[in-house]
């Protein structure tokens, strides 16, 4: 097969109107799945086509976690599995030295590994693993490629593979010892059934974040070539994506970062300095786990007492939770900086932190320009009260050294 049948079919499906899409999918899938003898070669052509398509998407600002998230939001589990495999196959082109640590982290989280022996074995192995026939697999392939093919250019966060080389100081894999310790504390806080223990563990994690962030700021201020803000994307999934974004924004603000919500793509871009971005990612993930568990418990309790576990209740709960977390983090972050200044008698710390915050604001302006804020309404008083109560129980005692109120 000299012509790449996958490329030809994908182009026809991508060019099809909504009215003609089903026909284009059927014709394309029939062509790809026509012969068992040619099926291994179709797999090889798929991987070759995906390598080119993913290279285009990396240049357009997309990253591995983004493309898996798109498949998860728009399609089905089989498409997500295909997406991860195609990302893994494309990754064979790049040595770890040309990938930034967050890119490598995304690949690890996706478990993007090449599990097949030889590209001709890919599609037969995939079909056997998922117990689907050739036509079903070919249809899923074309559906995924269409969704990816329609994605626009977006603001990049970090270099694409083969772009700017990773800094020598950047770790290739794994967490720093401090982040590993913080991650372990938050994992314990999420798993315990005792609120007091969760409070103590989360508080200790916050204290470590505060010290780590302030130490990083002082270290950067002493360098001849100062550090610059970076960015990462954090998925924010429905349902209740608005309140979840509020929670992420509260955590970002407390860590001198900014969060920009791209609702249509299901993620927020968080802009800040590297250590602060790590803190935001860890703390938001932990708080969301704790908030979801608390919301479930509160909903069950209200349901037993006669109040319905409505969507309005859950929405109001999460809005209140995020609002109260913001209040508590604002107070806690100010206290953390005051303690650091008092302990070290460092009169330069506040100007250093303020200068870093100003750099973050300038980076946001350069990346996104004019932004709009969005209001969130609350209609369930029981949910609001329960959410604030749950946020009070979170009892955050530390922060990553924010200076914003």
Image: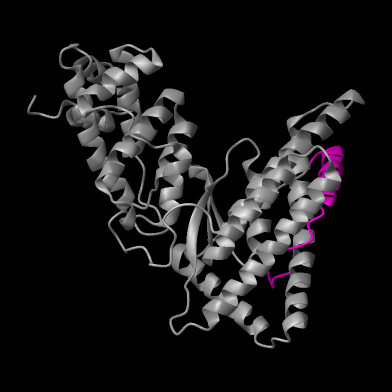
Horizontal side, residue 160 vs residue 49: left or right: right
Q: Could you say which is closer to the camera, residue 173 or residue 386?
A: 173
Q: The N terminus is located in which quarter? A: top left
Image location of residue 85, percent across then percent down = 35, 32
What residue range appears in magenta? 379-405
Residue 323 appearing in the image: no
Image location of residue 192, percent across then percent down = 77, 39
Count the numbered circles shown: 0
Horizontal side, residue 236 vs residue 84: left or right: right
Quarter-of-image position of residue 78: top left
Establish if 304 lies above or below 109: above
Image location of residue 143, percent across then percent down = 34, 27
- Residue farthest toward the left in the current orientation of the protein: 2
- Residue farthest toward the right in the current orientation of the protein: 305
What residue is at 19 percent from the left and 11 percent from the top?
36
What residue is at 41 percent from the left and 28 percent from the top?
81
Quarter-of-image position of residue 90: top left
Q: Could you say which is closer to the camera, residue 188 or residue 30?
A: 188
What residue is at 35 percent from the left and 51 percent from the top?
153
Colour scheme used in the picture?
Answer: one colour
Q: The C terminus is located in which quarter? A: bottom right
Horizontal side, residue 156 vs residue 195: left or right: left
Residue 99 appearing in the image: yes
Q: Is residue 88 magenta?
A: no
What residue is at 69 percent from the left and 63 percent from the top?
208
Q: Could you say which is closer to the camera, residue 388 or residue 203?
A: 203
Establish if 52 lies above or below 95: above
- Residue farthest toward the front in the current orientation of the protein: 177
Q: Is residue 391 magenta?
A: yes
Image location of residue 312, percent across then percent down = 76, 35
């Amino acid at each position: 097969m000299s012509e790449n049948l996958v490329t030809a079919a994908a182009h026809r499906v991508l060019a099809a109107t909504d009215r003609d899409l089903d026909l284009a999918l059927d014709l394309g899938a029939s062509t790809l799945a026509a012969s068992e003898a040619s099926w291994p070669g179709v797999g090889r052509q798929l991987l070759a086509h995906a390598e080119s398509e993913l290279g285009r998407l990396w240049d357009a600002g997309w990253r591995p976690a983004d493309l898996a998230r798109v498949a998860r939001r728009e399609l089905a589990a089989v498409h997500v599995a295909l997406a991860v495999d195609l990302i893994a196959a494309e990754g064979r082109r790049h040595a770890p030295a040309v990938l930034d640590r967050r890119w490598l982290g995304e690949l690890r989280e996706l478990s993007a590994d090449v599990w097949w022996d030889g590209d001709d074995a890919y599609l037969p192995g995939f079909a056997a693993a998922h117990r689907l026939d050739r036509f079903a697999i070919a249809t899923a392939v074309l559906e995924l490629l269409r969704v990816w093919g329609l994605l626009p250019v977006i603001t990049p966060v970090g270099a694409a593979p083969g772009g700017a080389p990773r800094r020598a100081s950047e770790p290739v894999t794994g967490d720093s010892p401090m982040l590993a310790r913080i991650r372990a504390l938050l994992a314990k806080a999420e798993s315990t059934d005792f609120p007091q223990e969760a409070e103590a563990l989360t508080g200790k994690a916050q204290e470590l974040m505060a010290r780590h962030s302030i130490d990083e700021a002082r270290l950067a201020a002493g360098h001849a070539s100062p550090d610059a803000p970076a960015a990462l994307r954090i998925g924010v999934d429905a349902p209740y994506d608005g309140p979840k974004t509020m929670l992420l924004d509260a955590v970002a603000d407390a860590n001198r970062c900014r969060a920009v919500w791209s609702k249509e793509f299901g993620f927020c871009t968080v802009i800040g300095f590297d250590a602060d971005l790590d803190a935001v990612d860890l703390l938001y993930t932990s708080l969301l786990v704790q908030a979801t568990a608390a919301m479930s418990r509160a909903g069950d309790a209200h349901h037993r007492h006669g109040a319905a576990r409505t969507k309005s209740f859950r929405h109001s709960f999460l809005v209140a939770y995020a609002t109260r977390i913001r209040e508590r983090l604002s107070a806690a972050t100010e206290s953390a900086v005051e303690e650091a200044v008092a302990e070290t008698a460092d009169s330069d710390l506040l100007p250093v932190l303020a200068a870093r915050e100003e750099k973050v604001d300038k980076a946001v302006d350069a990346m996104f320009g004019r932004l709009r804020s969005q209001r969130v309404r609350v209609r369930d008083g029981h949910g609001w009260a329960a959410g604030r109560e749950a946020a009070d129980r979170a009892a955050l005692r530390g922060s990553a050294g924010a200076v914003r109120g």
